[in-house]
Image (spheres, coloured by chain):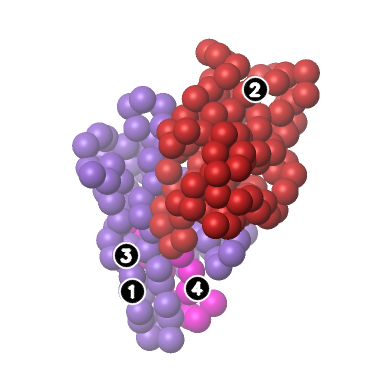
Chain colours: A purple, B red
Amino acid sequence: GAVVSQHPSRVICKSGTSVKIECRSLDFQATTMFWYRQFPKQSLMLMATSNEGSKATYEQGVEKDKFLINHASLTLSTLTVTSAHPEDSSFYICSAWGDGGELFFGEGSRLTVL
Amino acid sequence: AQSVTQLDSHVSVSEGTPVLLRCNYSSSYSPSLFWYVQHPNKGLQLLLKYTSAATLVKGINGFEAEFKKSETSFHLTKPSAHMSDAAEYFCVPLEDGGYNKLIFGAGTRLAVHP
C-alpha cells in the first residue's frame, strides 16, 4: 500500500476560492515533509519544506501567503492554495523521508482552477 | 552544491533492447544520488540509490546504475526494455544541509516502441 497518501487526488475549484490538500505518512512519522509542484511535461519544482510544529521553509520565489503550509502532527501536512487562480492549476506532490533512507512520494493532487 | 545533468531529454528504444539513461554529476565530493521514475499522472517511485556503499547499484524492475567517479557519471541501465518502462526518469542528488532536500532537474522521457 501507499506509504505517503495525498488527498484529494483531483480537485476542481472556482477562481478565488481556497483549496486544501492533505499529505499523510501512513506507517511512519515525518517531522519534515516536502511539497512540490509540477506543470505538464515539466519536472518537479520544490515549493517548500514543511516542519512539524514550526513554520514552513519556502523556496525562493514561492509566495508563502498564497501557499499556506501547516504541519500540525507527525503524520500530516496540509497545503492550502488561497484565492486560487487558473495559473495555480498544477500537479502538487508531497514527499517524506522514510526510516530506511528513501524519500517516499504521494500520488499527487491535480488542481484545476476554473 | 551538488548538481546533475541528464544528457538526454528524450530516449526512444524498441521493446526488448537495452536502455541507457545518462546522468552526470558535479560535486567536490562523492554525492548521494537517486534515480526516480514517474509514470504519467502519478507520483514518483524510487528505482535505486547510491550512498557510497557499492558502486554498482541494483534497483527494482531490472534497473541498475554504476557510480563512476572518474567519469562523474551515474547512468541508469536495463538489459531489456519493457513497454511498461515508458515513463519519466529523474536522476537526483541529495542536497546538503539539515533538511535533506531533493532538487529535481529536467528528467529524461523514455519511450518504448513495440
Q: Which label is found at residue B67?
A: 2
Seen as rendered, the residue at the extreme right is: B70
Check disc 3 and give the amino acid type: Ser
Mark 4 Cα-neighbour bin, 10 Å: few <14, some 14–19, many ≥20: some
Q: Which residue is mark 3?
A: A9
Q: Is residue B106 left or right of residue A57?
A: right
Q: Chain of mark 2?
A: B
Q: What amino acid is labelled 4 in the image?
A: Asp
The chain letter for the residue carrying disc 3 is: A
Camera-nearest residue between B114 and A10:
B114
Q: Position of residue A98 (x, y in %)?
A: 34, 32
- The alpha-carbon separation of the residues under discs 4 and 2 comes to 38 Å
Residue A67, quarter of picture? bottom left
Q: Is B30 rendered above or below residue B1?
A: above
Q: Is residue A10 magenta?
A: no
Magenta-colored span: A78-91
Q: Indicate the amino acid at tag 1.
A: Val
Task: Identify the residue under disc 4.
Answer: A88
SS at circle 1: strand
Taking the spot 33% from the left edge, 74% from the top edge, the residue there is A11
